[in-house]
Amino acid sequence: MTASLTERLADGVVLGDGGYLLELERRGYVQAGPFTPEVSLTHPSALAELHREFLLAGAEVLQALTFYASPQKLATVGLGDRVSDLNRAAVEIARSVAAEGDALVAGNLCLTWEYDPSDAANEAHVRSIFDRQLEVQLEAGIDFVVAETFTFVGEAEIATRCAKDAGLEIVTTMSFEKDPHSYEGDSAADCARKLRDAGADVVGLNCLRDPAHTLPLMKEMRKAVSGPLACQPVAYRTPDHNPDFTGLPEFPLGLDPLQLARGEMADFALEAQAMGIEYIGSCCGSVASHVRAMAVALEKVPAEVREWRSESKPMSAYEYHQHNRA
């Protein structure tokens, strides 16, 4: 029987997967702008292949592509009536690939763009959105939930309670834009405490910021709460004056020159591990080569897949220029 997320965390660091929507946009399957995840219906094999790349790279969790798979968001591209179909298909695709290895499948909840803390009736509305997604995702076979990319900690708390009420383990992560706090003004430490109090099994940060602008905030969370933390930054380099990559003029179509090298993501994984972060992953801009570099650094997979050698003379530029002796 496959070990649960909590059981795996008790044994050591769990390695997450990488980014989906921006990579699928780069490959031509997702439209920049809406960034809606209808690829699970229109090109399921493309989504399955990206899952498989992350699995083979060493990811121990595959997130179902149900980010933005909510009624109102899908309605922006004329798919408001396909919510159940899309959530089910996304989980089933992730489940089929996960069965090729030993990965867990995470359902995904995210910001709705509809949360309004000034409206007393709004919480019930947002909760209905999450409950509808979770009902289908549970039927399709998720192992736990990743609730992510929340700028309002209040909305993150709602998602957390929905998952716990459904009997699911949940990783809940905030995203901070230019300023390092939630829209309500809560610091990283405050958010960690509130999400832990709401029942989150793992709390942390994801998306928007690169490792250099995420890890200092993770230190604040580590000091504020006990228990597992999650860190999933973007693999794009962001500047001090605007650490949110979506606020840069390069977003979304000019990001390629800002992509971090795989070694930089490996360094991030080791720094996060040393900090005591138990769930280490990555977000937008992170591809299979980044995940593999992180897996090697964390000793999840061997550095070399298979043995090779040349008998008497160099048989590749790698040997010819003596990179193998570095």
Image (spheres, helix red, strand yellow):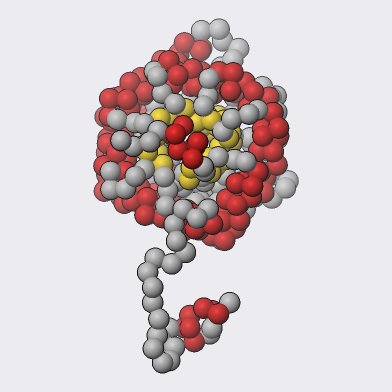
Q: Which residue lies furthest to the top in this view?
A: 120
- Give residue 47's position: percent from left, percent from top: 32, 46
Q: Which residue lies furthest to the front in this view?
A: 11
Horizontal side, residue 225 vs residue 256: left or right: right
- What residue sits 58% from the left and 35% below the top? 229
Q: Which of 167 and 69 is in front in this view?
A: 167
Q: Is residue 296 above or below residue 246?
A: below
Could one spot residue 140 in this view of the protein? yes
- Give residue 145's position: percent from left, percent from top: 43, 29
Q: Is residue 150 above or below residue 94?
A: above
- Give residue 17's position: percent from left, percent from top: 44, 46
- What residue sits 39% from the left and 88% below the top? 311
Q: Which of 75 and 304 is in front in this view?
A: 304
- Give residue 255's position: percent from left, percent from top: 55, 54
Q: In this view, does 283 lie above or below 237?
A: above
Numbered circles on residues, count = 0
Q: Which of 184 and 301 is in front in this view?
A: 301
Q: In this view, does 140 lie above or below 219?
A: above
- Screen quadrant of the C terminus: bottom right
- What residue sits 51% from the left and 12% below the top? 122
- What residue sits 57% from the left and 50% below the top? 269
- Screen quadrant of the N terminus: top left
